[in-house]
Image: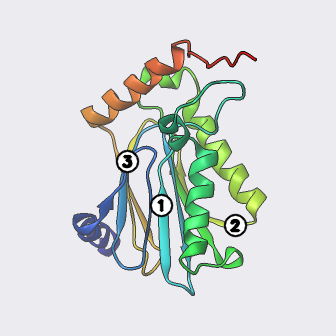
């Protein structure tokens, strides 16, 4: 019960991030709402700073034209941005610890693509490749999740939601529709 109350209290003061965002904090909690997206929390116990990202896709598709907005939604960019920002604020790579969440099957159109499971697989592989221990997870399932990271202690709180918030469903459906659309690519003639 104490952990539930602590998580809800932190949530009231949290800096909220959305898809394509990341944040680093030393004292203020960071929170996000996830569906099929994944959020990775990094923490350096000696520097006492924590960070969180929120990505929708594992990586940029090779050969696919991307916009700056698309890049921000990709795990490969989100993980590098988060880790580099942590290092710039005094964290050390060898001290980093991770907790990760998300990959839920909450929107039918995205469930069929397996995007949640692909996001989870990417997060696990990236952390393993970088040698960052993954200390806690809550992945997959039919839930949306509210995540709150306390950067002072490195504690991360996850609340599963059976009812998926309408704004989350709408955002994921909109993005799912853009994945099916053909992209214009720039052609350079010389």
Which label number is shown at residue 13?
none
For the residues marked 1 and 3, what is the alpha-carbon distance in whole angstroms? 10 Å
Query: As drawn, which residue projects farthest toward the bottom?
Result: 46
Name the side, left or right, on which 47 lies relative to 174.
Answer: right
Q: How many marks?
A: 3
The residue labelled by disc 3 is 18
Residue 66 pos. (x, y %): 57, 30
Q: Please, what secondary structure does the residue beneath circle 2 have?
A: loop
Q: Quadrant of residue 6?
A: bottom left
Residue 177 pos. (x, y %): 44, 18
The residue labelled by disc 2 is 132
Q: Quadrant of residue 14?
A: bottom left
Which label number is shown at residue 52?
1
Q: Residue at x 59, y 27 (%)?
A: 114
For the residues marked 3 and 2, what is the alpha-carbon distance in whole angstroms? 24 Å
First in sequence: mark 3 vs mark 2 = 3
First in sequence: mark 1 vs mark 3 = 3
First in sequence: mark 1 vs mark 2 = 1
Q: Residue at x 60, y 48 (%)?
A: 77
Name the side, left or right, on which 127 lies relative to 21.
Answer: right
Can you say whether 154 is above or below 42 in the image? below
Q: Pick the residue in front: 86 or 97.
A: 86
- Assess disc 2: are there few (<14), some (14-19) or many (≥20) residues with their C-alpha within 10 Å of its C-alpha: some
Q: Quadrant of the N terminus?
A: bottom left
For the residues marked 1 and 2, what is the alpha-carbon distance in whole angstroms? 14 Å
Can you say whether 88 is above or below 63 in the image? below
Q: Please, what secondary structure does the residue beneath circle 1 have?
A: strand
Contact between marks 3 and 2 (CB within 8 A): the answer is: no
Name the side, left or right, on which 128 lies relative to 101.
Answer: right
Residue 110 pos. (x, y %): 49, 24
């Amino acid at each position: 019960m104490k952990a539930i109350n602590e998580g809800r209290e932190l949530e009231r003061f949290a800096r909220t991030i959305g898809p394509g965002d990341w944040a680093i904090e030393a004292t203020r909690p960071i929170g996000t709402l996830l569906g099929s997206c994944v959020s990775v929390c990094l923490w350096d116990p000696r520097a006492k700073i924590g960070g969180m990202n929120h990505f929708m896709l594992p990586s940029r598709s090779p050969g696919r034209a991307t916009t700056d907005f698309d890049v921000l939604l990709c795990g490969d960019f989100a993980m590098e941005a988060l880790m580099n920002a942590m290092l710039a604020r005094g964290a050390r790579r060898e001290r980093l610890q991770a907790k990760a969440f998300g990959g839920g099957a909450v929107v039918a159109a995205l469930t069929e693509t397996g995007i949640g499971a692909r996001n989870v697989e990417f997060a696990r592989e990236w952390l393993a490749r970088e040698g960052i221990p993954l200390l806690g997870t809550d992945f997959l399932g039919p839930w949306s999740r509210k995540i709150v990271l306390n950067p002072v202690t490195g504690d991360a709180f996850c609340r599963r939601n059976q009812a998926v918030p309408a704004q989350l469903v709408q955002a994921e459906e909109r993005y799912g529709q853009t994945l099916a659309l053909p992209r214009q690519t720039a052609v350079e003639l010389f």
